[in-house]
Image (cartoon, rainbow, N blue to C red):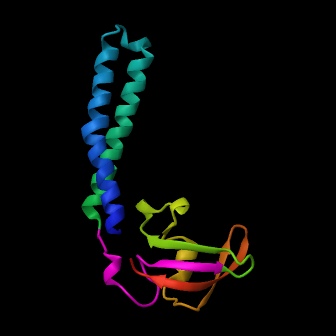
Amino acid sequence: MTRAGFAALDEELKTLKSVERPAVIRAISEAREHGDLSENAEYHAAREKQSFIEGRIKELEAMLGMADVIDPTKLSGAIKFGATVTLVDEDTEEERTYQIVGEPEADLEKGLLNMRSPLARALIGKDEGDTVEVKTPGGDRSYEVLTVRYV
C-alpha cells in the first residue's frame, strides 16, 4: 500500500471512531426513547448503520494492521508497484496516467489502478517505450508506455 493510501484509510478509521460511532450511538439512544422497539423504524435503521460502521472499523483495522507501506519515491526502473505510468492507447491516441496501487486504495476515476487489474499486470516489468497488449471486456487493447515515474 502506498503512504497516501495508508493515510486515507487511517483517516477514514479515525472519522468512523470519533464522529460516526458516537453519532449512531446517540441516534440509537434517541430512537429508544420513542417507545416500542419492534415497530420503531428509526431504531432499526440506526442499529443497521451501527452494524455497518463496526464492520468497517474492523475491516480497516485489519487492513492497516497488515499493511506493508511502500514509498514509491525510493523506487526506480521498470514498472512496479507504486509507479505512475503515462500510456497512450495505440488505437485512439488517448493518453492516460495511472498510479499502480494496492486493492484497498484503487480508484480508476482518480487514476489509481489496482495492481491486480489486467492492465497493471500487463504493465509490471515494462519500461518507457514498451508496448503492452491487454485483454479487456471490450476487446484487446494495445498501449505504449510513454513515461514511468515514482512520485
- Whether residue 52 is visible, yes or no, is yes
The residue lying toward the viewer, choosing from 135 and 123, is 123
Name which residue lies at 32% across and 62% down: 6
- Whether residue 115 is visible, yes or no, is no
Name which residue lies at 24% across and 39% down: 18
What range of the chain is rendered magenta?
68-88
Can you say which quadrant of the picture contains the C terminus? Answer: bottom left
**Residue 70 locus on image (x, y percent):** 31, 74
**Residue 61 locus on image (x, y percent):** 27, 53
Name which residue lies at 34% across and 16% down: 31
Compared across the picture, whether 8 is left or right of 86 comes to left
**Residue 133 locus on image (x, y percent):** 65, 83
The residue lying toward the viewer, choosing from 60 and 8, is 8
Asked if the magenta segment contains residue 82, the reply would be yes
Asked if the magenta segment contains residue 45, the reply would be no
Name which residue lies at 25% across and 60% down: 65
Compared across the picture, whether 119 is left or right of 40 comes to right
Rendered view: 124 above or below 10 = below
The number of callouts visible is 0
Rendered view: 95 above or below 43 = below
**Residue 14 locus on image (x, y percent):** 26, 46
Q: Tell me which corner region of the image, top left, top right, bottom left or bottom right, holds residue 23.
A: top left
Compared across the picture, whether 131 is left or right of 71 comes to right
